[in-house]
Amino acid sequence: MALRLTRRTATRGAIALMCVVSVTTGAFTGIGSAAPGEPDGDAASGRHELTKTLATTCPFADPVGPLELAAKTTASLPASMTVGQPVTIDGLVVSFSLPRAAAQQLLGTGSTLEGGLTFQLLLEQGKVKDALTVPMTIAATGLPGEGDLSLVATGKLPAFSPSAAGVLRIRVTAPKLALGVTGAPPEQPAEQVTCSADGGQDLSFGSVAVLAAGPPAADEPAPEKKAAPGPRPAGPQKHSLIAEEPPPDDTTTMVLPLQPNQVDNTSTIAKTGATIRSKPAALANGVWLNITDAEGFPVRSEVTGELAFAPVTVSYLGYGFLPISATVEFLPVDYQRSTMIHSFGTLLDGLLRNHLDVVSRLSNVKVNGVPLDAGPDCVSETPMAIDMIGEYDPFGGGFIQTDPKNPDPKFRGFTLPPFKNCGAAEKLSSLFTGQNSGPGNQASARLTIIPLCAEADHRKCPPVAQIPPETFRKSR
């Protein structure tokens, strides 16, 4: 049974909406603030630029053979959408560099290459998923005097209308290529290649808040009610996230950018008893999505954001007697290309159920004071899934943790996977795996609101105050 939001929570949310939107308008879009009185160009236009570089493998035919290409996708997306109103994704460009030797083989006696490229934008909203195929054109491009051949594909999607309120998440896929010599005869068609994305990558391109359609203004006539549509004729299935006639929506959606949260994280490794106290981190680009029905009951409530942890040195006793120290890092799944860990949580009745996927990396290992070269990329074989639960207020902070006694198994602790790529001079992966890896590890995180400060001298700003759990509970 859904629980009703308290009057105090609703009032606090309304007040915070007015304050936060007026102070931190750029938090959701990731756009910096302009000088006072001067609107930021991107923020004023209501759009933000997104860029994603995907490592792909493209199996060209011999003699070119398989190529590793970095496909860079850029586009301009709206900061928010409204149900039933058409929107566009503009400035779509996919660019990549074709190695010079491969370009020369494809050109043969020709002077320029041209062709096409298609890829998909994967749309996800809650449990509903869709895919938009994007056709693009690669203009005729000649090989430069030296270096690789840079190819650029451009295209445009028609406007579409989101059919439901919420957060629309967008991912990209590896492209399909068709490259041929300009002016080639029909019997010499362009070579078609289906590229694949290399493993271990985050395909996320961006997310957009989809707002519920508001009531018409007082001086505007209400739209005429249309007759209910009859059965759909047989034919291709339409997108479930894109509708010409959006269904009626009696929910209320609030998408609130949050003040930054300071995150103080502690982890305990079961096998060694080592305690990892991470340096304070900041939850940036925090967003609270809250959807309620016509009677005020919560339909969906999510808290998302990005954070990065600094490396920390940990000391413990290996096998119970051998002094060992190491630098430990918690990294994003796509740590080779990004630095921010995505945090996702659902919030219901004051309880936050939070999820992180992180990779652990070891370095600067010393055994009894003697350095042991772990190599540059000694990491866990797979990401660690860390689920924590606890009291949290989007405007007051909170404390979340794993709990061995929790009735839900996923909150009882996390598993540290085996390690790989460890050891520069000798293989050390099995050693580190035997010492550290296994289930039953514990984690906790205290989230404290970082207060906004308007003082020109930052030294006059108040320090971040720790919130004891008992104080937080009494304030509810």
Image: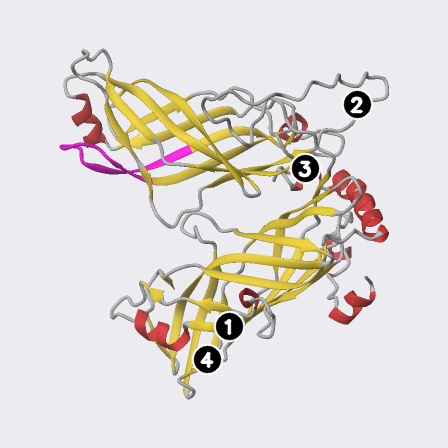
Residue corresponding to mark 1:
441
The stretch in magenta equals 56-72
For label 4, count other residues whose C-alpha is less than 10 Å away and answer few (under 14), some (14-19) or many (20+): some
Per the image, is 65 magenta? Answer: yes
Up-down relation of residue 280 to residue 62 (above or below): below
Alpha-carbon span between mark 3 and mark 1? 41 Å
Given the image, on which type of amino acid does mark 2 rest?
Answer: Pro
N-terminal of the two: label 3 or label 2?
A: 3
Circle 2 packing at 10 Å, graded few (<14), some (14-19), many (20+), is few
Of the two numbered discs 1 and 4 on the same chain, state the one appearing first in sequence: 4
Most common secondary structure along the magenta stretch: strand
Q: CA distance from mark 1 to mark 2?
A: 54 Å
For label 4, the residue is: 272
**How would you rate the neighbour count of disc 1 (Cα within 10 Å): few for under 14, some for 14-19, many for 20 or more?**
many
Q: In the displayed structure, does residue 196 sit left or right of residue 29?
A: left
Residue positioned 36% across, 66% down in the render: 419
Give the label, 1 or 4, closer to the camera. Answer: 1
Q: Secondary structure at mark 1?
A: strand
Q: Earlier in the sequence, mark 3 or mark 4?
A: 3
Please, what is the three-letter code of the amino acid marked with disc 3? Ser
Residue 446 lies in what quarter of the image?
bottom right
Residue wearing tag 2: 216
